[in-house]
Amino acid sequence: MCVYTRDRALCHRLDVTDAPRLDRCQPSCANIARTDHHADQFLQHAQVLEKQATSEAVPGPLADRLARRAEQLRELANHHEHDRIHPQEPTS
């Protein structure tokens, strides 16, 4: 999800428009906001990719690429889990 602020947008390094360019989205952009649901989806997709990568029907180079993408998705989910904001329990 993009919470677009032009000054922080990595998709606009050389562009002059004032709207997000989702086709140029960068995973390290400060405008990205992820929810727990997004992180769960990353992990689910990583499992699918890993299963595909271990299939005998998939050629070696493609299997390697699928495994690398699964690893990237797991890293994004782990990064979210580590850096997410936890709501505080009300104190009595």
Image (cartoon, grey):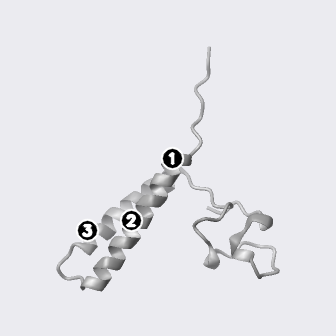
Task: Give the residue number, with chain letter if any, for mark 2.
Answer: 71
**Three-letter amino acid code at the position of disc 1:** His
Q: Earlier in the sequence, mark 3 or mark 1?
A: 3
Which of discs 2 and 3 lies nearer the camera? The answer is 2
Q: For the point 31% across and 83% down, which residue is it?
A: 62
- Name the spot of residue 49 as percent of width and height, x first: 33, 70
Which residue occupies the foreground of this view, 28 or 89? 28
Q: CB of mark 2 within 8 Å of CB of mark 3?
A: no
Q: Is mark 2 on a helix, strand or loop?
A: helix
- Name the spot of residue 51 as percent of width and height, x first: 26, 68
Dot 1 surroundings within 10 Å: few (below 14), some, or many (20 or more)? few
User: For this view, does 1 lie left or right of residue 36?
Assistant: right
Q: For the point 62% across and 79% down, which residue is it?
A: 23
Task: Give the residue number, with chain letter if any, for mark 3.
Answer: 51
Q: In which quarter of the image is residue 17?
A: bottom right
Q: Earlier in the sequence, mark 2 or mark 3?
A: 3
- For the residues labelled 3 and 1, the Cα–Cα distance comes to 26 Å
- For the residues labelled 2 and 3, the Cα–Cα distance comes to 13 Å
- Name the spot of residue 90 as percent of width and height, x first: 61, 23
Which of discs 3 and 1 lies nearer the camera? The answer is 1
Dot 2 surroundings within 10 Å: few (below 14), some, or many (20 or more)? some
The quadrant in which the C terminus is found is: top right
Q: How many labels does the image show?
A: 3
**Three-letter amino acid code at the position of disc 2:** Glu
Q: Earlier in the sequence, mark 1 or mark 2?
A: 2
Q: For the point 27% across and 73% down, which residue is it?
A: 52
Q: CB of mark 1 within 8 Å of CB of mark 2?
A: no
Q: What element carries label 3?
A: helix
Task: Give the residue number, with chain letter if any, for mark 1.
Answer: 82
Q: Is residue 32 above or below residue 36?
A: below
**Three-letter amino acid code at the position of disc 3:** Lys
